[in-house]
Amino acid sequence: MGNKNWHLGTKCIQEGWEPKSGEPRVLPIYQSTTFRYETAEEMGDLFDLKTNGFFYTRLANPTTDAVERKVAALEGGVGAVMTSAGQAATTMAIVNIAHAGDHIISSSAVYGGTFNLFYKTLKELGIDCTFVSPNATDEELEAAFRDNTRLVFGESLSNPSLDVLDIERFARHAHAHQVPLIVDNTFPTPINCRPFEWGADIVVHSTSKYLDGHASSLGGIIVDSGNFDWAAAGKYPELTTPDETYHGVTYTESFGNAAYITKCRTHLMRDLGMSPSPTNAWLLSQGIDTLHLRMPRHCENAMKVAKFLQADERVTWVTYPDLEGNAGYELAKKYMPNGSCGVISFGVKGGRENASKLQGCLQLAAIATHVADLRTCVLHPASTTHRQMNDQQLADAGVGADLVRFSVGIEDAEDIIADLKQALDQL
Ligand SMILES: *Cc1c(COP(=O)(O)O)cnc(C)c1O
């Protein structure tokens, strides 16, 4: 089963779990750490990577496996590895091919946790990161590359600044230096953007956002396009020479275009153990079943809210890339023609004080340190996540003191707008 020609909605529902005759129609939760075998030979062959099968949930599990195949199908990849959280997916995607003494390039418009990971933790591990603006010129991008650069990283639609990455251009520069482009596709999801179609080589997600969609489980996933030629690049010995901890297997020889994603599992899951619980994988699968219905509704509602805010005199500016005239509009039309996502940011007259007050005046929209799920939520970073910063530091971080981050859910747009209106009336 599984069909390359299926449309995205069909894939959301039908890909992944493929029950044989008499098996449960719905993906079962295999909540078991281990799997039983009849003979020592069967178990030995699994450990030698000679046969496929499950032996320990840290490496693979039937429930998780079904969800991995579903997301790989949606992105158009050859394989996927699910992780305990989005942060784990990004970490593994990098350290699978970059080591102490290596260098990476990242767009500066990335999630705060990703920025800290690259700026602090990877640096402590000996991996240097150069940050470039998502709007960097070709010359600026070229200048960032070094002999020891191993990959380029960016977010297709950045959290929280909503910059749209010029995936094709970033991929062109990466490939000219024979390194892969890794794209975090969390905000648009594969329903609205498929980075592999534009030259990205690896995709990562925080599935905690729209893919789960219900804000019920943390998770991450790494998807391999299978398109990058690791052997031709000549700079990834971890993939192209024997791994003595796996009986001398050479990933590119034994696993072909699935070399990268196989090593992620057999090497990094074995050693780092950032694996998801089977129950969280099952919740993710339930979420993805309706992803193709939820994303258009998020976009439709967000557009109505953005237009309402734009027309209100108490609102000073609105960032939503689907709005004509927005900085990211042209790139959004190219890479996400059916809509971007449900997250909007805007400013209110009266700056920090009124932006903070607005949060408390909202009734339907909950104050929450979360975005991208089916319930509308709001956050004023300057008085919450970024409260230790002064106005100048906030401006430098691209998070003005007046910025309100508004994640539009899939309730009725009229009610979300009425809630915003009554809150603005109280300022
Ligand atoms: C939330 C988020 C992450 C981190 O994901 P967790 O599941 O919270 O670890 C990474 N990238 C983006 C774009 C995010 O929004």
Image (spheres, rainbow, N blue to C red):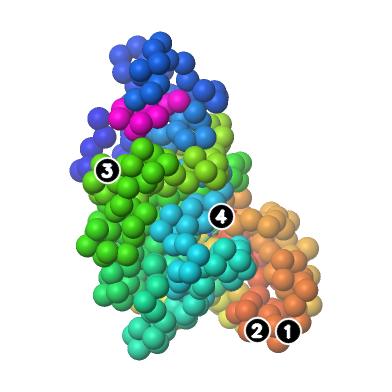
Report the amino acid beneath label 4. Answer: Gln
The circle on residue 395 is 2
Does residue 340 sit above or below 394 in this rendering? Answer: above
Q: CA distance from mark 4 to mark 1?
A: 28 Å
Q: Is residue 226 left or right of residue 311?
A: left
Residue beneath disc 3: 255
Q: Is residue 79 above or below residue 139?
A: above
Indicate the secondary structure of the residue bearing disc 1: helix
* 47 inside magenta stretch: yes
Task: Identify which residue is drawn at 47% across, 35% down.
Answer: 59
Splitting the image into 4 quarters, where does residue 40 fall?
top left
Mark 1 burial class by Cα count in 10 Å: few <14, some 14-19, many 20+: some
Mark 3 or mark 4: whose residue is earlier in sequence? 4
Q: Which residue is mark 4?
A: 87
Residue 11: within the magenta? Answer: no
Q: Residues within 10 Å of mark 4 (few under 14, many from 20)?
A: many
Q: Is residue 41 above or below residue 406?
A: above
Disc 3 from disc 1: Cα separation? 52 Å
Ligand 1 contact, mark 4 (Cβ < 8 Å): yes
Name the main secondary structure of what is drawn in magenta. Answer: loop
Indicate which disc, 4 or 2, sits on the residue closer to the N terminus.
4
* Mark-to-mark CA distance, 3 and 2: 47 Å
In this image, 355 relative to 189: left or right?
Answer: right
Magenta stretch: give its range: 46-55
Labels 2 & 1 near each other (Cβ < 8 A): yes
